[in-house]
Image: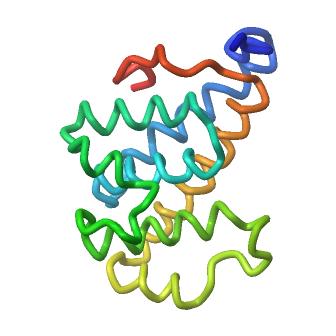
Amino acid sequence: MTARLNYFTGPTAEMALPHLMALGRGLKDTPVPPATQELVALRVSQINGCAACIDMHTKEAAAAGETPVRLHLVAAWREATVFTDAERAALELAEQGTRVGDAATGVDDAAWTRAAEHYDEEQLVALVLLISFMNAANRLNIIARQPAGDYQPGRFH
């Protein structure tokens, strides 16, 4: 696949992208465990079908020590036994926060309550921002047709 455009060049990109990239880097410094952040980012990217983001977050998670088994099972986290209750709550929140078009109700109260059992308010804010950021980044990559497969861990850090 060939990219439709290089959104890292030009005056609009020079104005906007540093802020977007800084937001992504800043979200890594939240009180949500790094493994959970990568699992959530990977699941959102899977749902949105963003190959470039799936490639990036799989490699970032592996470089941070995530196991291949857990990475392979993110898409089937409900049936998998390798995730903690807290990770499962975050993945559920990520799914419902991503599939807002599929379910007009968005995140239901039960999913929010489960997440709130494992994460404090600051962590919930971080998760919601991460899910929102990932949805935006996925769409940017999909519209611009960014190719997958060449991502190197640490590239945007």
At x 67%, y 14%, the residue is 8
At x 28%, y 51%, the residue is 70
Q: Nearer the viewer, residue 80 or 123?
A: 80
Q: Nearer the viewer, residue 10 or 131?
A: 131
Query: Horizontal and vertical percent for residue 136?
Result: 68, 44
Query: Horizontal and vertical percent for residue 157?
Result: 39, 26
Residue 81 image-quadrant placement: bottom left
At x 36%, y 77%, the residue is 120
50 over 14 or under it: above or below: below
At x 49%, y 18%, the residue is 149
Decide if residue 144 is on the left or right side of residue 19: right
139 over 91 or under it: above or below: above
Decide if residue 109 is on the left or right side of residue 35: right
73 over 64 or under it: above or below: below
21 over 95 or under it: above or below: above
Give the position of the N terminus as an image quadrant: top right
